[in-house]
Amino acid sequence: MTRISNSQLYCILVGLLTPMAFLQIPGLLAHLLSQNGWIAAFIAIVPGYGLVLLFNYILQHSQHPFPYLLIEHLGQPLGRILGFIYVLLFLFLTSHSLRLFTDFTETNVLPGTPISIHIGVLILALVLGIRAGIGNLARLMEIIVICGLTFVLVLVLIVILQQGEIERLLPVGSLNYNNLAVATGTNLFIISKLFIVLSFGFWCGNKDEAGIVMKKAMITYVLVIGMTTLSVLMAFGGTITSVLTFPTFSMVTLVNIGNFIQNIDIIFIGVWILGIYGIAVLTWFMACYSLQIILNLHDYRFVAAGTALLVGITSILISSNILELLVLTQVFVPVLYCFFFIIIPILLFLLILLKANRSSSLESKI
Amino acid sequence: MRYIKNKPESKPSPQEVIHTDIPASLDEIRSQLDTLYQFCSDIVIREFVFGNPETRGLMVYFDGLVNKDEIENNILRPLLLDIDMLDVKGDLTHRDIINDVKTRIISPAELKGVKTWDELIRRIGSGDCALLIDGYGEGLVAGTRSWQSRGIESPDNEVVIFGPKEGFNETLRFNTAQLRRRIKSSNFKIESFVLGRITKTDVIICYIKNIAPDSMVEEVKKRVNGIDIDGILDTNYIKEFIIDDNKTLFSQVMHTERPDRVCGQLLEGKICILVDGSPMALVLPSTFTDYITTPDDYYTYYIPASLLRLLRFTAFWMSLLLPSLYVAVITYHHEMIPTALLLTIAASREGVPFPSFVEALLLEAMFEMLREAGLRLPRAVGPAVSIVGALIIGDAAVRAGLVSTPMVVVVAATGIASFVTPSYNASLVVRILRFGFLFASAVLGFLGIMIVLVIVLLKMVSLSSFGVPYLAPLAPLNLAQISDIMVRRPWFVNRSRPYLEGMRNQQRQGNGKDEGG
């Protein structure tokens, strides 16, 4: 498998975590915690760090990349079956990201264009991406992340400077702790996507450094989401933000430079397309690569074209309208993240720990 | 049967002769020369007798390729006249004539013995003169090359404000001399190859040892040696054989006519290929950023040079995306335009019968035709055509209501921006891709543009030039080098060369070592 550098791994992880969350999470946090939403965004750094340690432990105590790692620790039938379930999960997540994005563009950018056209065009670009191979995808992610982070930084600064009022964050004290836990958990589900490091960590220059890269990616994510939530709340206030469907998008429409550069939402969507492309291509890549390992196929690249139809049809059939899709996104998808990217890794971690203890006690007996 | 018996003994064909050794007998040599150069009116074969005892000799060269004065003064005169004054007169035994002729009688600076017709033919085809002596299966080839050639002129396609004004010309040796004059180190290597089964073209590969990675030099030599074609007439013939990916628009090897630019690239560990008969040098490996930079950047103070480089980057993106962005905004995303401007554009578009996409396509196509016409027409006519074209597009078309004024402005601005791109190859790619973006913007607006951009980026990141990623140092990211791409890093901080895999000496300044020579 092609080697990737640590900076490429960082960009892959940031590219997977951030773009979708950038649109969704600030609104969710504001909905749960009103003007205190930003606190949950920053607090996520603590459990996020726990997840980093968890994934790093599994990574360092495994000999093979995911999904072969499942066979390594769980044995042949169970590991292979679970691996196949992960393939379906990644294909579902690819379809979900595509649908969420296309519904958004259909509503906000190109009303009237059928979503099948959007999905078809994106799938074409995605298949080309997977066929290009992981080395080239990693390079593409570098460009996407540099452009994306620069844009976000500029956007947040402009909004804070033009529209931001610190009073809108007050009062800080009235915090609903239940909602704080839910909001932090929601954020944590996104961070759990660091799970893919169990594959990518094996291909980076030095596996031992994958933990540091994960940490940096997680901190970047927290900062981006935290700053965005902060700027949205400073621009709209807690009450208005909590009723907006996509407050980040609304924030973009506020930008006005010299009464000439205005309504730059389309530029935002342009940059966002790159991010969504990154998410979809990485999850789809994981599905193809996992399928290659599970079914002992020759090359994952050829799986992309085969699964394209499946991804396309699933993303069309996944829901009948954007509201249904939002419910799916806020209820069903977090459960999937929680089970597959948090609970199963914790079980895997316990199993590895148990095995390590057993082998060390055996050694001491001998 | 009778016919077969009386059949005359057949003469060997030129193809058979060419692969044989030069015979000892002068009569046989003459006969084989006649076979080889039948119907070649420019060949000069001069037989003569020299020395005591008398020895027969023969001189062969091509008229127009040699310096006749040199042949007359340094070869013929010593053999025919001066030989009588030499002490060796009485000692010219049959056994050591050729050695004495070589070492004591004739006096050209460059002299080499050849034993095969193949080698002899190649040398006289390059402008050397061959001397053949009866009784010896060997010819002496004297370097007498001299022909009318274009002088050293300023390159038309790579004009600079500051810096050297010299360019390569069509004579290989002049070109290597220009490089050697600038890089005097003994580590500067110039290796020769002969390519082309019929043209026998001289090709050279030059590099600086210890700076250019050895593995890359070997790879270039391997690829060049692997070329088997009847003729090489320009460097592009070689380029198409040796590039990593030949199914792409993007040029993976840089063309330049400037010796100073080649030297700059050689100092960065790159390798240059020159071909006799072509003023274009190939520099490899080459990355995308090489097409945005110019030699001028390094001859101008770094602050204005950096600003100009930023301007060039902006112009590059403008020339690629401006028409498609305009079409996308006009067709799908009106809300982006301030109301006053939107009203102005709407007023000017009133009465235009075409959608903005067709309008842009027509104007772009017309502009490309004008540009091509301007290139191919004689210089006296070219500007006139451009003026007529500009008037037709800019004025008459607007008055006729075929196109709107803002579209003319957009296409004109795109045209100007495209001229800012210093490399013709890069500009060609941009011109072609622009149409792709235009179609995408007409179909899906900004979304389409971004999808095409992703596909183009994917192609670019997957390309490499001799193992160097095409988008380096942006992808894969190299923060140390990227600062010399977006802006021009001042010389006093430019301490290391751009990294190439296998480069042994990356230090440019400050290690106190003599680099050899």
Image (tube, coloured by chain):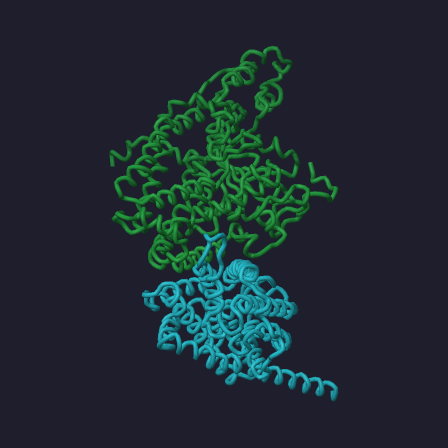
Q: Provide the letter of the chain coloured green.
A: B
On the rendered image, what quadrant is the N terminus of chain B found in? top left
User: Is residue B154 rendered to the left or right of residue B269?
Assistant: left
Tell which of B405 and B151 is nearer to you. B405
Which residue is at a point 58% across and 71% down the rendered structure image?
A169
Q: Position of residue A130 (x, y in %)?
A: 45, 65
Tell which of B331 and B203 is nearer to you. B331
Q: Position of residue A122 (x, y in %)?
A: 40, 64
User: Is residue B393 rendered to the left or right of residue B427?
Assistant: left
Residue A350 in view in this figure: yes
Residue B220 in view in this figure: no
On the rendered image, what quadrant is the C terminus of chain B found in? top right
Residue B424, quarter of picture? top left
Q: Position of residue A95 (x, y in %)?
A: 42, 73
Residue A206, quarter of picture? bottom right
B324 to B201, vertically: above or below? below
All told, the count of numbered labels is 0
Which residue is at a point 49% across and 45% down the rendered structure image?
B253
A14 to B514, vertically: above or below? below
Tell which of B280 and B439 is nearer to you. B439
Q: Position of residue A307 (x, y in %)?
A: 40, 72
A118 to B157, vertically: above or below? below
Q: Provide the letter of the chain coloured cyan.
A: A
